[in-house]
């Protein structure tokens, strides 16, 4: 455990300006990244009496061995740099949201000559239009199946498309009217792209024009006694209406907004996001996190906004973002969102009406997600405890091992011999504690001798750390104890 006074910057050395700072441990790894309107005031707060610090902050500053900072011109630049560094260094004491599951999205590949409608997961790709995310992939497929009657866009893979073009015969969807069959030239690339863009417009909420156009066509066909055509248009209208019903209207003013709610306790937090487009809920997602730093609800909201919009541009950032608490000050965050969107973004807490009611629904979802996460974790804890007890019994330990370190030796035909260490704490992998060792005392291939060297080095280091903290003060010399 390090003494923060050992690396405290000298008086007057820290600038009184906006910036971003990094705490590093004794191995040089970044363990915490933060930003500040005034670096001097913020960093000074870390070097007060340890008894006055939050327990998580106290753990961080005693783990750190150095601090460094970068001055920026505005708080908006500080926000962006903080996000970039957290993403780059993955600091162990920063709040990092993780998806409680991989949410699928409805994607239209407008970057292809013949755009394709499909279910996609993972990072977004340039030139692809996304809708969602959705809770389940089957919900996307049901919606697409209804809409292909009206917008028969290609849904097949590249291999199927290429094979159909080679044999001159479309797949089954082309025969039943759910694909315009561009593979065999039934429509031109331009006509197919127009269908894909109309599909996107409908999914984006511009539904009224298409419904009215189909209704007019149905009436016209009926007047001309083209009853089969009129019946087909009637079925198309019903299909679109069923697709619309799957996303009920929640905001009557056709609002584009994201609603973010947070449920938290002392140790963990859950975030739920509802994506509302055209007044309808078009997607939902959730995150959970361990509260590894001292952070309030406003701080959790800020971290969530950074993760949600850090890689987004344009319309992916909505005109309105509704949150349960606002960071202080809120202006840099609102300006950062506006820069990513390219126009103004309203960041506020809903106070009344439909938006407040919908926020309450999002909040209930967040509470439920936190309870479900804790239930799963408790179940996992029971399983892990049972497994650790079995390990203790198998190797004759008096109690279950709280920490397990495993070593292995690797080499390339006797050369470049290295050892690796993986760590488990309470039955969970602790990847931040993984280590690699180079064999230094001899050359050649000798796994037993290599293992002896690595374990000796590891325990010498362990005993030295215990001596520093006073836990081994009356014990023998660390080197002699290992040898």
Image: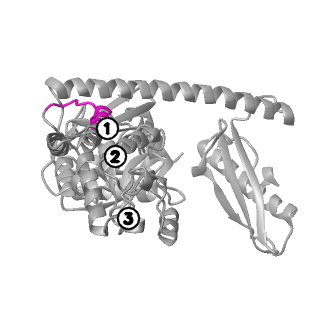
> What number is the disc on residue 149?
2
Left or right of 349 in this view: 288 = right
Q: Residue at x 27, y 52 (%)?
A: 200
State how far apart marks 2 and 1 are (Cα): 8 Å
Quadrant hosting residue 293: top left
Does the CB distance between marks 2 and 1 fall below 8 Å? Answer: yes
Residue 57 in picture, x, y percent from top left: 41, 40
Secondary structure under badge 3?
A: helix
Q: Which image quarter is the N terminus in?
A: top right
Residue hosting label 3: 182
> What number is the disc on residue 239?
1
The residue lying toward the viewer, choosing from 312 and 126, is 126
Secondary structure under badge 1?
A: helix
Secondary structure under badge 2?
A: loop
Q: Residue at x 49, y 65 (%)?
A: 164
Nearer-N-terminus badge (3/1): 3
């Amino acid at each position: 455990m390090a003494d923060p006074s050992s690396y405290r910057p000298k008086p007057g050395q820290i600038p009184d300006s906006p910036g971003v700072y990094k705490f590093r441990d004794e191995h040089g790894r970044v363990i915490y990244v933060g930003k500040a309107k005034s670096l001097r005031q913020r960093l000074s707060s870390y070097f007060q009496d340890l008894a006055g610090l939050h327990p998580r902050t106290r753990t961080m500053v005693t783990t750190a061995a150095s601090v460094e900072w970068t001055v920026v011109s505005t708080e908006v630049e500080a926000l962006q740099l903080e996000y970039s560094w957290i993403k780059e260094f993955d600091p162990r004491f920063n709040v990092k949201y993780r998806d409680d599951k991989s949410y699928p999205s409805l994607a239209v590949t407008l970057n292809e000559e013949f755009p394709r409608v499909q279910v996609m997961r993972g990072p977004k790709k340039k030139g692809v239009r996304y809708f969602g995310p959705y809770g389940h992939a089957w919900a996307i497929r049901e919606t697409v199946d209804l809409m292909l009657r009206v917008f028969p866009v290609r849904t097949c893979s590249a291999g199927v498309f290429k094979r159909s073009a080679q044999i001159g015969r479309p797949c089954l969807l082309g025969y039943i009217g759910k694909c315009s069959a561009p593979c065999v030239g039934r429509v031109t690339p331009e006509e197919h792209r127009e269908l894909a863009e109309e599909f996107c417009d409908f999914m984006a909420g511009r539904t009224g024009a298409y419904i009215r156009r189909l209704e007019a066509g149905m009436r016209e066909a009926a007047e001309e006694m083209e009853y089969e055509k009129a019946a087909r248009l009637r079925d198309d209208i019903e299909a679109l209406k069923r697709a619309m019903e799957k996303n009920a209207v929640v905001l009557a003013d056709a609002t584009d907004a994201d609603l973010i709610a947070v449920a938290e306790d002392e140790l963990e937090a859950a975030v739920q996001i509802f994506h509302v487009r055209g007044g309808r809920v078009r997607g939902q997602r959730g995150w959970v996190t361990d509260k590894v730093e001292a952070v309030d609800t406003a701080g959790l909201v800020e971290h969530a906004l950074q993760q949600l919009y850090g890689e987004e541009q344009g319309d992916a950032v909505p005109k309105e973002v509704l949150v349960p608490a606002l960071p202080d000050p809120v202006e840099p965050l609102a300006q950062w969102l506006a820069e990513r969107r390219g126009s103004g973004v309203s960041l506020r807490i809903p106070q009344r009406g439909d938006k407040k009611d919908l926020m309450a629904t999002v909040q209930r979802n967040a509470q439920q997600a936190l309870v479900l996460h804790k239930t799963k974790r408790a179940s996992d804890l029971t399983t892990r405890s049972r497994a650790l007890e079995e390990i203790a019994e198998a190797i004759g330990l008096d109690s279950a091992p709280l920490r397990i370190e495993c070593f292995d030796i690797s080499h390339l035909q006797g050369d470049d011999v290295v050892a690796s260490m993986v760590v488990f704490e309470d039955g969970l992998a602790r990847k931040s504690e993984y280590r690699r060792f180079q064999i230094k005392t001899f050359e050649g291939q000798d796994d037993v001798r290599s293992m002896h060297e690595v374990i000796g080095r590891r325990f010498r280091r362990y005993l030295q750390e215990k001596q520093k903290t006073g836990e081994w003060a009356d014990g023998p010399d660390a080197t002699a104890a290992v040898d």
